[in-house]
Amino acid sequence: MKYIFLVFDKIEEAGMAIGMLIMVIMNFFNVVCRFLLPQTPFSYTEELTVLIFIWVTMLGISCGYKRASHTGLNILTDKLHGVPKEIVVLFAMVCSAAFAALLFYEGVGMVQNQLAHGQVMPGLQISAAFSGMSLPCGAVFIFIRSIQAGLREWNEVHKLRKEA
């Protein structure tokens, strides 16, 4: 199981790093060309940047769960101890996983709709499903990472309760 998470780590981190690098380079050249040339040869870069940004965002959410840096309300959990805190941690994990499952389900439906209607991105002239696939693919990563983070947090709380 540890190796599976290492593979997910590499995919997330490489995907985000490469995506960010491509976006920075494309935007830099696009801005330079706007100042130097009367008409930019990179008319599709805005659309491609948005496409990559969507993928990087989904991987970033997953990475946020992995590092336990996702937004959370600690007002309640900081005041709880023992079994009630364990229950709240498990409830939060189940809610996060359920939300990721809902994202996956709706994302698959969206991609099917995009493919059925032949939706094409106007600038790139590629299927809109390339951007739509970020939702179900990202949801898989988010689902796995929310379970991983929830179980890690539950184990920490459970260990503290046993020691007390």
Image (tube, rainbow, N blue to C red):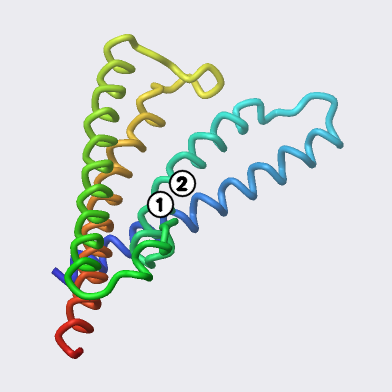
Q: From the viewer's side, name the closer residue of 9 and 22.
A: 9
The quarter of the picture where the N terminus appears is bottom left
Q: Residue at x 24, y 68 (%)?
A: 85
* Residue 113 image point, x, y percent: 29, 16
As drawn, the label of residue 50 is: none
Disc 2 secondary structure class: helix
Mark count = 2
Residue 141 in the image: above or below residue 69: above
Image-based side of 1 in relation to 156, left or right: left
The residue that disc 1 covers is 61
Image-based side of 123 in relation to 85, left or right: right
As drawn, the label of residue 57 is: 2
Image-based side of 57 in relation to 153, left or right: right
In the image, what residue type sits under mark 2? Thr
Check whether the beta carbons of the residues at disc 2 and disc 1 lie within 8 A of each other: yes
Residue sitting farthest toward the front: 79
Q: From the viewer's side, name the closer residue of 145 and 111.
A: 145
Q: Residue at x 85, y 25 (%)?
A: 38
Label 2 Cα crowd, 10 Å radius (few <14 / some 14-19 / many 20+)? some
In the image, what residue type sits under mark 1? Ile
* Residue 23 image point, x, y percent: 59, 46
* Residue 79 image point, x, y percent: 36, 70
Q: Quadrant of residue 50?
A: top right
* Residue 19 image point, x, y percent: 50, 50
The quarter of the picture where the C terminus appears is bottom left
Image-based side of 30 in relation to 113, left or right: right
Q: Residue at x 33, y 17 (%)?
A: 114
Label 1 Cα crowd, 10 Å radius (few <14 / some 14-19 / many 20+)? some
Structural distance between the alpha carbons of marks 2 and 1: 6 Å
Q: Residue at x 40, y 22 (%)?
A: 128
Residue sitting farthest toward the top: 117
